[in-house]
Amino acid sequence: MKKVHFHMFERIPAKAGRSRGKGMRKRQKILRYTAGLVLAAGIVLSRGQEACASSMPYDTYSYDWWTEDVLQPHAYLYTESYAGNRFGSELKTPQDMFFRDGFLYIADTGNNRVLILTEEGEYADEIAEGLSGPQGVFVTKEHHVYVADSGNGRVVEYDEDKNVIREIGRPETDLIDASQNYMPTKVVVDDAGRIYVIAYGINMGLVEFNEYGEFQGFMGATQVTVSPFEYMWKTYFSTDAQKQRMETIIPTEYSNIFVDQSDFVYATISNLSDEDHLNGADAVRRLNPTGTDVLRRLGNYSIIGDLYSASDEASWSSFTDIAATDYGCYFILDNAGGKVFCYDYDGNSLFIFGGMGSRSGLLRNPTSLVLNDDQSRLYILDAQLGSILGFDITEYGANLLGAMKAHYTGNTEESDRLWREVLRENANSEVAYIGMGKISMREGDYQQAMDYFKLGNSRKYYTRAFEFYRKEMMQTSFAKYMGVAIFLIAAVLLVSAGKKIKRWVGEVKCRNI
């Protein structure tokens, strides 16, 4: 597939891929070939059984500096599916899933229930009474279950015994048209008890309620940007027929939300326009409690999924769910391509895997993604298959994420060890070189950090390391040259003083004669 080498992404220069020359490209191809050999020969352990990485129905890859997809060792391997009558009745168009303390909670929309399973896929319990087409589910640390009961236009809170505590209905506000149906589709709750809801057809942001269920307003409304040319054309020059065909200039809606351990809300956008994709608009946000997007974007590309150009015969990635770790990495589910995209805290792509199809391990209509507590297993809910697919982490994936976690928690020694393991399995890993560079920078070895960041093609971190290195050199040079200057000045003064003393002694002798 043809990859983008033009202005599509703000974070990569228009001709960055061409300015390096054929020699560098050839060396990169050799590295990719070597990594491919390691990948083909590698055998990883999954749930106590050996699984050949090459037998997977999908590839694992990432994008390099030149926006070319580069094969990587598998980070997660498909192992099993949960489906069928083991759930009491088969899943019917399930739309959401949540993991808490060893249990999976599934919004089984077509069966008007919330299904509760063990992490091994065994039936544990369900909530069904009074629900109508629930599309979202969230579970607090106290095991209170919040359900976005879409068909009834409400959010329902249940206690740990599945008893109804309260219902939160339509917000009391004039900002929502009275004729518009209120249909909550997703819900999350932070540690302070604030409730955030995505409601179908509401594009003013997330609906926010306080801990008492009182409407507080809208948070994180998406901004609309219209160029002067677009505005003038639509206002003054386009015909009525053209205006009808043109997209209405309204904010986009969020497709899913996730609250992390710091009470920041990750939100995905699935309905970006072709123009948004071509301009590299990000499809993910991380909102603080005031609604400000604080997602770090230090990677070379926008956080938008696969990197296609307008001429590719492929669908843009459409993010339908997101899950974040407690060390800043986050996993995004792509409904259009059936893929999982993993990014680090800075927005660098760690790995991409998955696909659409009928083979075991491929998806048809993925709707939700969750991780277990230690990220050793990833679950994907598929509405068309009516099943939950389980993917287990490989040794390579554990080393990669472990290195990220070790660095995040300040364990430099462990991070260094794991990054070296990652490079041993994948010598083409740019994020590993960036990780090694961060370690060197933390230890004050800025020159070595610059070398690592250059290998990792990270201009931003290279610039940062260079600034520290230059400051260090200036301080060192200043002290050295000041010492030399002081010595020279002292020598000049001594010579001058010596001459004056000698002349004075001579004058005294002359007077005595």
Image (tube, grey):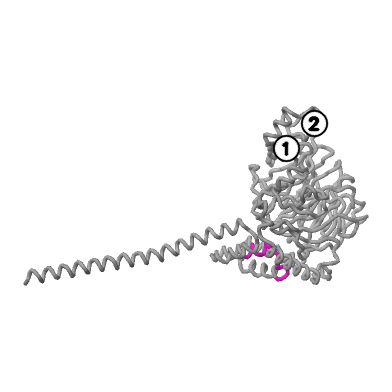
The answer to if 260 sits in the magenta stretch is no
- Visible in this render: residue 157? no
Contact flag, marks 1 and 2 (Cβ < 8 Å): no
Residue for badge 1: 251
Name the residue located 79 percent from the left edge and 35 percent from the top edge: 182
- Visible in this render: residue 8? yes
In the rendered image, residue 341, in percent from the top left (x then y), is placed at 75, 55
Q: Callout 1: helix, strand or loop?
A: loop
Res. 242 mark: 2
- Image height check: is 470 above or below 250? below
In the rendered image, residue 337, in percent from the top left (x then y), is placed at 82, 52
In the rendered image, residue 476, in percent from the top left (x then y), is placed at 45, 64
Q: In which quarter of the image is residue 28?
A: bottom right
Name the residue located 45 percent from the left edge and 62 percent from the top edge: 475
Magenta stretch, main secondary structure class: helix
Q: Which of marks 1 and 2 is nearer the N terminus?
A: 2
Amino acid type at circle 1 is: Pro
Amino acid type at circle 2 is: Gln
> As drawn, is 199 to the left or to the right of 445?
right
Look at the image and give the residue range highlighted in magenta. 424-436
Q: How far apart are marks 1 and 2 (CA)?
A: 20 Å
Quadrant location, the N terminus:
bottom right
| Nearer to the camera, 403 or 155 | 403
Q: Callout 2: helix, strand or loop?
A: helix
Quadrant location, the C terminus:
bottom left
> As drawn, is 45 to the left or to the right of 344?
right
Name the residue located 66 percent from the left edge and 48 percent from the top edge: 10
| Nearer to the camera, 112 or 21 | 21
In the rendered image, residue 281, in percent from the top left (x then y), is placed at 71, 45
